[in-house]
Image (cartoon, rainbow, N blue to C red):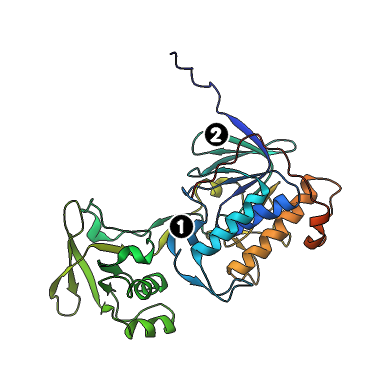
């Protein structure tokens, strides 16, 4: 059987709206674009939908989403994904955005796979951009299993000895979450005080978690699997060996805009400056969610949802001349559904 020769040119697909970033704001923007009848492609460098929420705190409860007194990160993502599916989008995961080229009535984005996506417009909902965990020096020479940069479901830690490293909200929240499930949880923090929310710290101190402050992990033991860690006390320099099956480095992440920084956007640190309609000043490029900044910006998920709706409604008027920016009342759409724009590729959902 002969093997076909590779295409001499990178494959190009077409879409009305390309959304870069499949976190909460991107998923809601995807749904809303479908409600306005736009064809959508959703692109994300992560291998799953849900962005940072799904990657970093799927089991953590969120309290500031309208309509939910409390909801876990993964439950929220699952609902947003079901909602986004109504737009029948094309999904491209594990694929980052590259160079941007402008045409007379469209833009083309090259991706990390060599694919090219020609779109009527782009909406960036990339959160903090591409993020990588801050390194833990003691792990430099450990290449086995047992290091969890992404925390699994709490019940999976039953009967295990877990060591968490860090002093911020993520470290303290995970310690509190895993304490009822694991055999033992130890939290190691290099400073004497935590930078987490006071209520969470109080909960930590009243829990069964072993808290070692002013300390650091000096060594991780175990070849194919984590077996123990050695902790050094900064004050006394004393060393203590602790049994450990799992090490969770909760030291935060390093954010990068990647190729987006070369798009000619007005940047303020890692944020994109936007106007009130969420336009960026670069033709046919809009942004919404945590990646945006403007005077009075409040970096909350609830705000990102509103910015996503604002961006999509303004984009609808740009992409479909004659459409009003105001979409009308969503409750009326059950009686006059808008058919989705035809797509070139089958939708693929990978969780």
Question: What residue is pinned by disc 2?
Answer: 115
Placement of 28 over or under 165, stated as above or below: above
The image quarter in which residue 332 lies: bottom right
- Position in image of residue 120 (x %, y %): 71, 41
SS type, badge 1: strand
- Position in image of residue 184 (x %, y %): 25, 73
Residue at horizontal 41 percent and vertical 61 percent from the top: 253
Residue at horizontal 75 percent and vertical 47 percent from the top: 37
Callout in the foreground (2, 1): 2
Left or right side of 266 for 203: left
Residue 250 is at least partly visible in this image:
no
- Position in image of residue 123 (x %, y %): 65, 51
Which quarter shows the N terminus?
Answer: top left
How packed mark 2 is, by other alpha carbons closer than 10 Å (few <14, some 14-19, many 20 or more), is: some
Placement of 221 over or under 70, stated as above or below: above
Placement of 102 over or under 25, stated as above or below: above
């Amino acid at each position: 059987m002969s093997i076909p020769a590779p295409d001499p040119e990178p494959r190009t697909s077409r879409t009305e709206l390309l959304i870069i970033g499949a976190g909460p704001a991107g998923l809601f923007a995807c749904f809303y674009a479908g409600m306005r009848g736009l064809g959508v492609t959703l692109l994300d460098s992560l291998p799953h939908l849900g962005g940072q929420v799904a990657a970093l705190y799927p089991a953590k409860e969120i309290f500031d989403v309208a309509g939910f007194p409390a909801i876990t990160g993964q439950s929220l993502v699952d609902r947003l994904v079901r909602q986004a599916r109504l737009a029948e989008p094309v999904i491209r995961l594990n694929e980052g955005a590259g160079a941007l080229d402008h045409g007379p009535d469209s833009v083309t984005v090259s991706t990390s796979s060599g694919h090219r996506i020609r779109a009527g417009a782009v909406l960036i909902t990339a959160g903090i951009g591409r993020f990588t965990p801050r390194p833990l020096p003691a792990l430099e020479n450990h290449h086995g299993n047992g290091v969890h940069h992404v925390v699994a479901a709490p019940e999976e830690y039953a009967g295990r000895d877990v060591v968490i490293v860090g002093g911020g909200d993520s470290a303290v929240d995970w310690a509190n979450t895993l304490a009822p499930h694991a055999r033992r949880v130890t939290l190691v923090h290099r400073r004497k005080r935590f930078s987490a929310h006071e209520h969470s710290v109080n909960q930590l101190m009243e829990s069964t978690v072993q808290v070692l402050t002013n300390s650091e992990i000096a060594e991780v033991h175990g070849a194919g699997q984590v077996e123990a860690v050695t902790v050094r006390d900064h004050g006394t320099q004393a060393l203590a060996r602790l049994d450990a099956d799992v090490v969770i480095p909760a030291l935060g992440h390093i954010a990068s805009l990647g190729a987006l920084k070369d798009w000619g956007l007005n940047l303020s640190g890692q944020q994109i400056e936007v106007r009130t309609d969420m336009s960026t000043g670069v033709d046919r490029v809009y942004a919404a969610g945590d990646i945006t900044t403007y005077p009075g910006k409040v970096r909350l998920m609830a705000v990102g949802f509103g910015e996503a709706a604002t961006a999509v409604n303004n984009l609808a008027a740009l992409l479909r001349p004659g459409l009003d920016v105001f979409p009308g009342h969503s409750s009326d759409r059950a009686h006059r559904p808008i058919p989705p724009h035809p797509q070139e590729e089958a939708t693929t959902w990978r969780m």
